[in-house]
Amino acid sequence: MNKKCFIPPTTLGFMITSNEIIQIALSLGFDSCGIASAECLNDEAEHVENWLSSHFNAEMDYLERNREKRYDPRLLVPETKSIVCVALNYFQERIADDSECKEKLMGRISKYAYGEDYHKVLKDKLFVLKKKIEEKVGEMKTARVFCDSAPVLERAWAVRAGLGFIGKNTSLIIPGKGSFFFIGTLFLPLTLEPSASVFTNRCGTCTRCIEACPTKALSPFTVDARKCISFVTIERKSFLKNDEDIDLHGCVFGCDKCQDVCPYNLKFAIVTTEKHFKPLEKMLSLTKNDVVSMDKVTFEKEFSDSPLMRAGFEKFKDNVMTC
């Protein structure tokens, strides 16, 4: 046999079970884990195509690229047989009330941005999970770790893996836990048993998220990014301070309003125990004057490990001055 040959992916899965993988993931600190078979996301693809055709993706042109790979993970990583999907809680207690925000920063920052950048935190944990699986099955050269950094429909795979359902606010809602979760995936060349049945939608007649959206960006199960405060304060390229039509409704980086009013979060959300997501001291002490007087070098030094880097110095400063 050629020395470069590896064990066929179809036999690897027999060395470890789906339940074993899930238990390892939970032991590493993930709050939820499930497994789905790698296949084409036909129904989800139709929804995304309709969303794109309505131009709801705004300036996020990257969502129009590599669409086939988004819909079929086997085109992104050809050897993929199964997808492990994990969720990690980032919920924070209310940092400040409206009056404090106006006095200090003149705006609110999304809960997910008070700690360290989630991309690295989730990927590091997923690489540990991959290594522990390899201890059972051997090296998997074609296994891949993803977290909001590739053409992967994470929420769709979370649903397929039985973690939860997509709410009317377009967030993944995990029954009994809420929606304040980051999602990560591990593509494996293993044939594994899907871990759970898929949840049906459990929003019922509730429309609190739609009613709470300050810019009316939400309709059931759809968000128009052109109106969404999260897009406007993070992804939008143009400055806001000279745009008289912009109202950030007290937000300077992201928006949690549609999640804050969700009954699943009001009842079940608990503060994260992940140390990397605990609020950084520099975030808690930040004031509007700090931002206005700060230069780019200082900003990038102080916040190199923060999600604020997604917007960048000029964008974040512009948000603060606009709010």
Image (tube, rainbow, N blue to C red):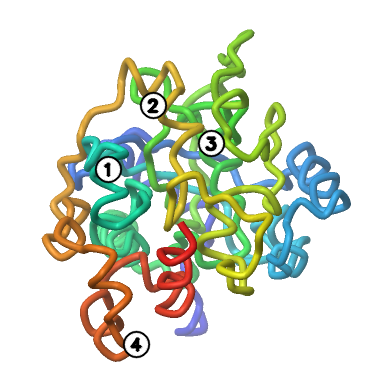
CA separation in Å, label 3 and label 1? 18 Å
CA separation in Å, label 2 and label 3? 10 Å
**Left or right: where 256 falls relative to 81:** left
Name the N-terminal-most of marks 2 and 1: 1
The picture places residue 62, in percent across and down from the top left corner, at 69, 69
In the rendered view, would you say 319 is above or below 181? below
- Residue corresponding to mark 2: 178
Query: Crowding near pointer 4: few (<14 within 10 Å), some, many (20+)?
Result: few
Name the N-terminal-most of marks 3 and 4: 3
* Res 299 visible: yes
Q: Amino acid at mark 2?
A: Gly
Name the N-terminal-most of marks 3 and 1: 1
In the rendered view, would you say 36 is above or below 234? above
The picture places residue 44, in percent across and down from the top left corner, at 73, 40
The image quarter containing residue 268 is: top left
Q: Amino acid at mark 4?
A: Lys
Foreground residue among 72 and 16: 72
Residue 296, labelled with which disc?
Answer: 4
- Do residues under tags 3 and 1 come within 8 Å of each other at their CB atoms? no
At x 51% / y 58%, what residue is drawn?
A: 189
- Residue corresponding to mark 1: 30
